[in-house]
Amino acid sequence: MNKLYGPWSDIVIGYKVIRADDGWQWVWVEPGEDNDVGAVFDLESGAYRDAARDWDENGCGVPRLTGTLKALATKLEKVGR
């Protein structure tokens, strides 16, 4: 699911979950800024759930993104990812 999930419809900024050396991690992509990265998780779903947590803590009042990221995490957990 190497797609960019962002808070607004123009999707030039947002979270992307990538394969890391030891698992999966989220990356916050924002043009002109250094990327922020999350912790590494064994399962892809853990990275999506952590991205949702990060958005809850640092987001700009756009709760829909949190729900999208949590839904993706749940979907992946159901298939063992």
Image (tube, grey):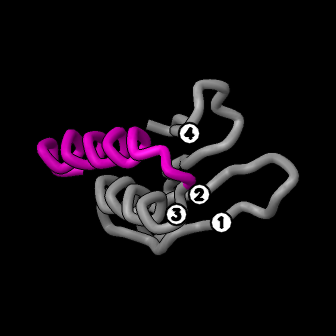
- Numbered disc in front, either 3 or 1: 1
Dot 3 corresponds to which residue? 20
Dominant secondary-structure state across the stretch colored magenta: helix
- Specify whether 14 is left or right of 23: right
Local packing at callout 4 (Cα closer than 10 Å; few below 14, some 14-19, many 20+) is many
Q: Please tell me whether residue 69 belongs to the stretch shown in magenta.
A: yes
Residue 70 falls left or right of residue 27 = left
- Magenta span of residues: 60-81
Of the residues shown, which amino acid type is indicated by label 4?
A: Gly
Viewer-closest of 24 and 13: 13
64 vs 34: above or below: above
Which residue shows up at 44% across the image and 71% down it? Answer: 40
- The circle drawn on residue 36 is 1
For marks 3 and 1, give the CA distance.
14 Å
Name the secondary structure under disc 3: strand
Tell whether label 1 touches label 4 (CB within 8 Å). Answer: no
User: Which one is earlier in the sequence, the residue at label 2 or at label 3?
Assistant: 3
Label 2: few (<14), some (14–19) or many (≥20) C-alpha neighbours in 10 Å: some
- The residue singled out by tag 4 in the image is 6
The Cα–Cα distance between marks 1 and 2, rounded to whole angstroms, is: 6 Å
Residue flagged by tag 2: what amino acid is it?
Answer: Val
Give the image location of residue 37, x and y in percent.
59, 67
The disc, 4 or 1, on the residue closer to the chain's N-terminal end is 4
- Which residue is the site of mark 2? 27
Disc 1 residue type (three-letter):
Asp
- Quadrant where the N terminus sits is top left
Asked if marks 3 and 1 touch (Cβ < 8 Å), the reply is no
